[in-house]
Image: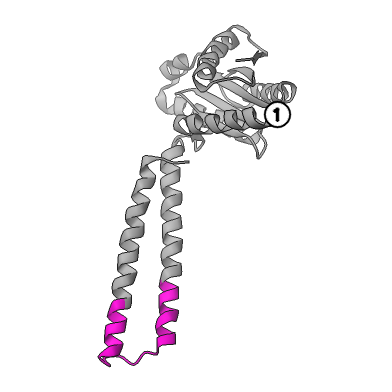
Amino acid sequence: MKHQLFQNAKYVLGIGGLFVGLIMYGISLAIELEAVDITMSTMWLFFTVILASLGLLIGRIISILHHWAYRDFLTDTWNRKYFSTRIKAELKGKEKNGNDLCLALIDMDDFKKINDCYGHDFGDKAIRKVADVLKANIRATDSIVRIGGDEFVIIFPYTDLACAKLIAERIRKTVAEECEYVTVSVGVIEVGEAARTTALIQEMDHMLYHAKKMKNSVTTMVMEA
């Protein structure tokens, strides 16, 4: 996955390489001038240690850049930018391999009223609590995405509609039981063979609208194209 923040990594590599090069040049020059008593084997050991440390540092920086690019800071779930990238990859995989793919759409009911009655701090806590319920009720292969203020999507790769609905229903009931003043509407889409990203996002909006009408149940649909 690429993001413009990753462009910074090449500058880190360049500066790090320049830094190592200058150190090695300085050590080599000092040895030639007999300013220091260092054997070549010691010098190369020192070089290896520096290179390994630099590699670990660059790996950590790239990890941080990835976190900034694709994570939602309020809930520590994936964000909408990640969804756009991931769903394209999933659709390509489905077109190639014909594997099952489902999406669960979760929207907090009357969230504006929650903010108006209890304040935005409570609203943020409620969003985090719902995200925690989602994390506790999915599998390792599934991905949670916060696509809007109070809207989430769960990506279920290699999962049919019946299984995805079962997980979604468990999530809906758990939120009602564990989250104070909060309920959610849930819809599940089984993605068809010829689905496109743009059409899929449009269907997600329609699904949330229908899910709002169907209280106390999970709405399902199959998207053929």
Residue 176 lies, with reference to residue 139, above or below; the image says: above
Camera-side residue of 139 and 222: 222
Prevailing secondary structure class for the magenta stretch in the rendered image: helix
Left or right of residue 34: residue 154: right
> What is the span of residues highlighted in magenta in the rendered image?
25-50
Q: Element type at marker 1?
A: loop
108 magenta-colored = no
Query: Where, quadrant-wise, is the C terminus in this rendering?
Result: top right
Residue 206 lies, with reference to residue 29, above or below; the image says: above
Residue beneath the point at 31% across and 68% down: 19
Classify 10 Å Cα crowding around label 1: few (below 14), some (14-19), many (20 and above). some
> Which residue lies under the disc numbered 1?
159
Tag count: 1
**Residue 180, image quadrant:** top right
Camera-side residue of 126 and 2: 2
Left or right of residue 193: residue 14: left
Amino acid type at mark 1? Thr
> Residue 137: where, in percent of width, then height?
66, 32
Q: Can residue 172 be seen in this view?
A: yes
> Residue 220: where, in percent of width, then height?
66, 14
Residue beneath the point at 28% across and 89% down: 32
Residue beneath the point at 48% across and 29% down: 84
**Residue 22, image quadrant:** bottom left
